[in-house]
Amino acid sequence: MNKDNKQWVWLAIDVETGEIVGSYTGSRDAQGAKGLWDSLPPVYRQYAVSYTDFWKAYDVIFPSKHHKSVGKET
């Protein structure tokens, strides 16, 4: 195992159907957040709201009207 080459598996799941609607494997940085956003079908990018943790890259990549940061208690 190479600890210097960490890879993250990003998944976007439709809360109503449980279907995985987007995915990205790569670094946990703005490029990874963009990879996940770009993997979403256009209808999700246009209408869906993504709920994420408070990681800064989401605010840079996800349009504010389609993004809400929430904590574990939410």
Image (cartoon, rainbow, N blue to C red):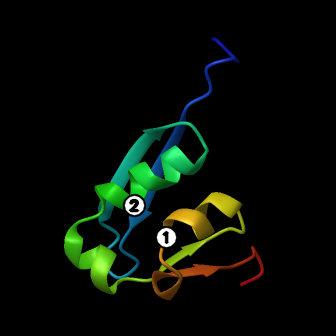
Residue under label 2: 37
Taking the spot 44% from the left edge, 38% from the top edge, the residue there is 25
Taking the spot 70% from the left edge, 17% from the top edge, the residue there is 3
Tag 1 or tag 2, which sits nearer the N-term? 2
Tell me residue 22's x, y (percent): 33, 58
Taking the spot 32% from the left edge, 60% from the top edge, the residue there is 20
Under tag 1, what secondary structure?
loop
Which quadrant: the C terminus?
Answer: bottom right
Q: Is residue 34 above or below residue 27?
A: below
Tell me residue 36's x, y (percent): 41, 54
Left or right of residue 34: residue 5:
right
Disc 2, disc 1: CB below 8 Å? yes
Q: Is residue 74 above or below residue 24?
A: below
Residue under label 1: 62
Tell me residue 24's x, y (percent): 40, 45
Quadrant hosting residue 2: top right
Under tag 2, what secondary structure?
helix
Tell me residue 34's x, y (percent): 44, 54
Circle 1: is it few (<14), some (14-19), or many (20+) Cα within 10 Å? Answer: some
The amino acid sitting under disc 2 is Trp
**Residue extending farthest left:** 42
The amino acid sitting under disc 1 is Phe
Left or right of residue 1: residue 49:
left
Q: Is residue 52 above or below residue 25?
A: below
